[in-house]
Image (spheres, helix red, strand yellow):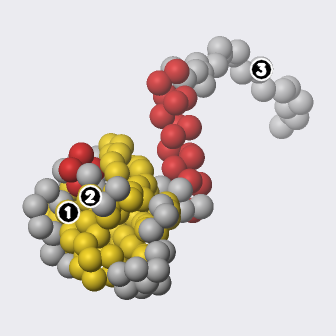
């Protein structure tokens, strides 16, 4: 038998057909898919609570509210109203902006609100503070802005609220 030292023939050259070209929309989509878990791990896409405060000569107002929440989440807003004066304040009205609260459903007040989203606190002694708690459920996603004011005669302490509701 004769030895065969012949080499096999070279394979034919074939042009590669695989191309990694992505459209702009695909690049944007892949970037979003990659960044969402990172943002979520830092708590940037979940609920966030914010505090704002204001003072007048006779009143102190401090509000803790959800700055970021998800649609259908039920949350609470608390407003602490204090008497900074040396006299008893017979009536202090805490007025919650209709524009802000209309973005939510199932709104309930403790103590109960009178008319037009207003809670009346009676006989607030010097140095005393009271809480008003408002519970609600996020209905519409988007940015919601509003105002809360504590009023006694010409005295007013007011804060602005900004809440982002995510889908």
Q: Quadrant of residue 9 in the image?
A: top right
Can residue 134 be seen? Answer: no
Question: Front-most of 24 and 158?
Answer: 158
Up/down of 107 relative to 25, above or below: below
Q: CA distance from mark 1 to mark 3?
A: 88 Å
- List the residue tagged with mark 2: 96
Marks 3 and 1: in contact by CB < 8 Å? no
Could you tell me which secondary element the residue under label 3 belongs to? loop
> Does label 1 or label 2 sit earlier along the sequence?
2
Depth check: give the residue in front, 18 or 124.
124
**Could you tell which of marks 2 and 3 lies nearer the N-terminus?**
3
Question: Would residue 101 be found to the left or right of residue 154 on screen?
Answer: left
Q: Is residue 7 above or below residue 85?
A: above
Viewer-closest of 151 and 69: 151
Contact (Cβ within 8 Å) of mark 1 with mark 2: yes
Q: Earlier in the sequence, mark 1 or mark 3?
A: 3
Residue marked by disc 3: 10
- The local secondary structure at tag 1 comes to strand
Q: Which residue is mark 1?
A: 118
**As drawn, 44 above or below 125:** above
Q: Secondary structure at mark 2?
A: strand
The residue at 45%/68% (across/down) is 58
Q: Position of residue 155 (x, y in %)?
A: 38, 59
Q: Residue at x 28, y 82 (%)?
A: 123
Within 10 Å of disc 1 (Cα), the crowding (few <14, some 14-19, many 20+) is some
The extreme left residue here reads 115
The image shows residue 71 at horizontal and vertical percentages of 28, 56
Give the alpha-carbon distance from disc 2 to disc 3, as whole Å: 83 Å
Q: Position of residue 8 (x, y in %)?
A: 78, 26
Q: How many numbered circles does the render carry?
A: 3
Q: Label 1 to label 2, Cα distance in Å?
A: 6 Å
């Amino acid at each position: 038998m004769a030895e065969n030292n012949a080499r096999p023939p070279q394979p034919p050259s074939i042009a590669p057909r695989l191309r990694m070209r992505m459209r702009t929309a695909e690049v944007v989509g892949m970037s979003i898919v990659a960044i969402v878990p990172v943002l979520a791990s830092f708590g940037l896409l979940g609920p966030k609570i914010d505090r704002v405060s204001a003072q007048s000569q006779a009143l102190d107002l401090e509000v803790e509210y959800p700055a970021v929440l998800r649609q259908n989440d039920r949350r609470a807003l608390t407003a602490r109203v204090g008497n900074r004066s040396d006299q008893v304040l017979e009536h202090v009205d805490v007025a919650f902006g209709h524009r802000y609260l209309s973005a939510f459903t199932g709104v309930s007040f403790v103590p109960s609100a009178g008319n037009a989203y207003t809670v009346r606190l009676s006989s607030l002694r010097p140095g005393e503070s009271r809480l008003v708690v408002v519970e609600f459920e996020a209905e519409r996603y988007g940015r919601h802005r509003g105002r809360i004011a504590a009023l006694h005669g010409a005295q007013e302490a007011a804060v602005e609220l900004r809440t982002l509701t995510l889908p």
